[in-house]
Image (tube, rainbow, N blue to C red):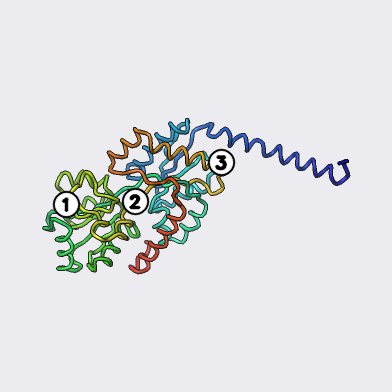
Amino acid sequence: MPYTRTSLPRRLSLLALGLLALPAAWAQADYPSKPVKLIVPFAAGGSTDLVARVLAEGLRQTLGQPVVVDNRGGAGGMLGSEAVGMAAPDGYTIGMATVSTMTVNPALYPKADAINARLLPLVNLVSMPSVYMVHPGMGVKDFAGFVAALKAKPGQYSAAVPGVGSLGQLMVESFNDTLDVKMANVPYRGSGPALNDALAGVVQIMPDQLPSALPHIKAGKLLPMVVASGQRVADLPNTPTFKELGYAELNDLGISWFGLVVPAKTPPAVAEKLRAAALKAVQLPETQAHLRKMGVSTADAQGQDFAGLIAAQVRRNRAIVQKAGIQAE
């Protein structure tokens, strides 16, 4: 076709666009070529941070680049999540996604919806059981006795939870509604202070994630009543799950999960490479060994609709918050 006054500029424009696209394509093919940052939306030392550091080491091996953990705590995890969403969508900034940041915060804070809209749910990797514990002074030994005591003295027993609108508070409210009992919710500023008062008997009950709860259970300072888990926990073989007791919804609510998110506009090829690397990372023998020591297990992530799981749990948590009348601080 002969050049015309209109066709030549158009061909030159297309050529220029093609040349501009080449660096991006090369960058994707070469990904990753430098260290990757993993933002944890909570302070160091907590469950999310501990899981993140195990995953970071696994990703270092499967990606072939260092994965640097960056703790950005504050605002119930929203500050860290926002930092991920605002980062360049090039695969070099990824974030930890949790039940709290992705499904509880949107049920409480309008801003959380806008923050999470800038994130692409990548993959769900790890699930963590929760356990309801009581102080020995409550005088109960098993789940049946626990429920009987709550029914006998409505509102006289208190449950420590790590904050208003926390997953712990939602768990207690849902327990009250399902079992037709009344535990008083006592919000603390974090899991540490809540656990201290539970150990001292200031409050009688505390639902907590298994890794932080287990040492105190093994020491006999707190007694396990029931766990939220896919199956009985090896370290607590005599403690039933909510599921086997017939409370499947309480079981699902009490299982925490940890996954990865990236900025929403991350190129599909980069996102898929990250997802594949993460799935390989959690299957590494050393990763599995570390996770088992923490009392957590690998999520069944192959083929899972992570975004669909998040959306369903947001709807569930909004219903719990609305029914219980929970208001954010």
* Residue 43 visible in the snapshot: no
Which circle's residue, 3 or 2, is located before the other in the chain? 2
- Gap between marks 2 and 1, in whole Å? 21 Å
* Residue 50 visible in the snapshot: yes
Give the amino acid type for the residue marked by disc 1 in the picture. Leu
**Residue position marked by numbered label 2 in the rendering:** 256
Quadrant of image for the C terminus = bottom left
Q: Residues within 10 Å of mark 2 (few under 14, many from 20)?
A: some
Please identify, in this view, whether the residue under mark 3 or under mark 1 is nearer the observer: 3
Give the amino acid type for the residue marked by disc 3 in the picture. Ala
What residue is drawn where x is 42% and y is 37%?
Answer: 280
What residue is drawn where x is 38% and y is 62%?
Answer: 316
Q: Residues within 10 Å of mark 3 (few under 14, many from 20)?
A: some
The kind of secondary structure element at disc 1 is strand
Q: Position of residue 231 (x, y in %)?
A: 27, 50
Please identify, in this view, whether the residue under mark 3 or under mark 2 is nearer the observer: 3
The kind of secondary structure element at disc 2 is strand
Quadrant of image for the N terminus = top right
Q: Which mark is residue 223?
A: 1
**Residue position marked by numbered label 3 in the rendering:** 269
Q: Position of residue 235 (x, y in %)?
A: 21, 44
Q: Which mark is residue 23?
A: none
Which circle's residue, 2 or 1, is located before the other in the chain? 1
